[in-house]
Image (tube, grey):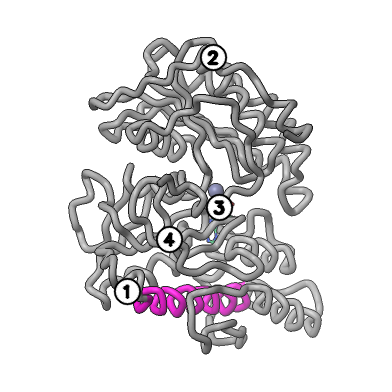
Amino acid sequence: MNDKETLIKMDMGALRGDVVTDDGILCLGIESSCDETSAAIVDSNRNVLAHIIYSQIPEHQKYGGVVPELAARAHILAIDMVIAQTLSAAGKTIDDIDVVAATAGPGLIGGVLVGWLAATGIAQSAGKPLVAVNHLEGHALVPRLHAAAADGSDLASGVPFPYLLMLASGGHCQILLVRGVGDYELIGQTLDDSAGEAFDKVAKMLGLDYPGGPVVDARAKNGNPHVFNFPRPLCDKPGCDFSFSGIKTAARTFLSRVDVPYSDTFINDFCASFQASVVDCITNRLEHAMRDARVRAASPQTLVVAGGVAKNSAIRTAMEELAASHNMTFAAPPMNLCTDNGAMIAWAGIENYREGNVVTEPIAPRPRWPLTELKRT
Ligand code: KG4
Ligand code: ZN
């Protein structure tokens, strides 16, 4: 056991290990892995009773990105208030809660520890079961809590398994075959930057605010995507992997030849052209994924996008068209459930609790925790 594990080792004796299998489960979910301190109370009938997201974005904006130490401190200052306000907004006390769930990784470990230790303390003192949620699984399963289908399909009971998932966030970019809770097959992933990182870095080069994704998305709406010829890395290659570092380098090279300040038209065209290349990469790689033998064998009926980048309007539109052309339903979570939030952790908590995945012994939160390691035999 290393020092970090010793530090967070605690007696889990007070935790209840029994699992309620009937409906009506009420879960308190806590998220703190990056720059949002969030809590939500969600029930197993897909009602979000209360949801509070305290965003630290203003605190990190002046640095152009998340500063891990500042994030951890801000989580410490906010966490108790966020949890208390969530319980109060739902009109519940901790006694009413059936299960507590919190992100236990992957993410910025200082922040993850804050939320995880808060959840552990609450669960232990109140004698409630505790679920250690993988943050990526939160993103991956939230379309089963709430999602809208582009073709009007009824998703009132959530997106059914299996589905083909484009998971694109600030930290990750993966195509996954989602077979069930804890059962993820990695079909493709980025070899370097995530899609969100590419948006954030290009925005920074243009002098735009952090996080860059929403700003680039908005600017692109008024721009011409054909002005700059960005590369489409790997699109001429087989497979389903991504590479965004070449797009970023192309952006830097273009900008080195242009005098500042950039005009509004220039920024809009630049954003539209950059975004078009990201969209093309995503659709190209998803098309390959649909031809992948594992995906064909599983025959998923739904194409899903999740993670912060799922807010992007052009990506949603392109994926909707792609799904339609392959006779698939396209589904996406509502905007507030794309970026980091406590409701997705509460929902993943419920889905795992139903499977009996509760913490029964001390665990070490993990800065890295691939989804493919969740599979239980
Ligand atoms: O899922 P998320 O909140 O955090 C991580 O788990 O990483 O994703 C944040 C990322 C940021 O990179 C942000 O720029 C990006 O999502 N993002 C967007 C949009 N809204 C947020 N990217 C493209 N278009 C958007 N509209
Ligand atoms: Zn996330």
Q: CA distance from mark 1 to mark 2?
A: 52 Å
Tell me which segment is drawn in magenta: 268-292
Q: Nearer the viewer, mark 1 or mark 4?
A: 4
Q: Amino acid at mark 4?
A: Glu
Nearer the observer: mark 2 or 3; the answer is 2
| Quadrant hosting residue 96 | top left
Mark 3 is surrounded, within 10 Å at the Cα level, by few (under 14), some (14 to 19) or many (20 or more) other residues, namely some
Distance CA(mark 4)–CA(mark 3)? 11 Å
Residue under pointer 2: 13
Quadrant of the displayed image that contains ligand 1: bottom right
Left or right: 235 in relation to 147: right
Left or right: residue 369 compared with residue 334: right
* Residue 347 visible to an observer of this rendering: yes
Q: Check mark 3 vs ligand 1: CB closer than 8 Å? yes or no.
A: no
Q: Residue at horizontal 54%, vertical 10%? A: 125
Q: CA distance from mark 1 to mark 3?
A: 30 Å
Q: Nearer the viewer, mark 1 or mark 2?
A: 2
Of callouts 2 and 3, the N-terminal one: 2
Foreground disc of the pair 1, 3? 3
User: Residue beneath label 4, please?
Assistant: 185
Residue drawn at x 44%, y 49% is 375
Of mark 1 and mark 2, the one earlier in the sequence is 2
Helix, strand or loop status at disc 2: loop
Question: Which quadrant holds residue 156?
Answer: top left
- The answer to whether mark 2 is within 8 Å of ligand 2 is no
Tell me if label 2 and label 3 are in contact, CB under 8 Å: no
Residue placed furthest toward the front: 377
The residue that disc 3 covers is: 370
* Mark 1 residue type: Glu
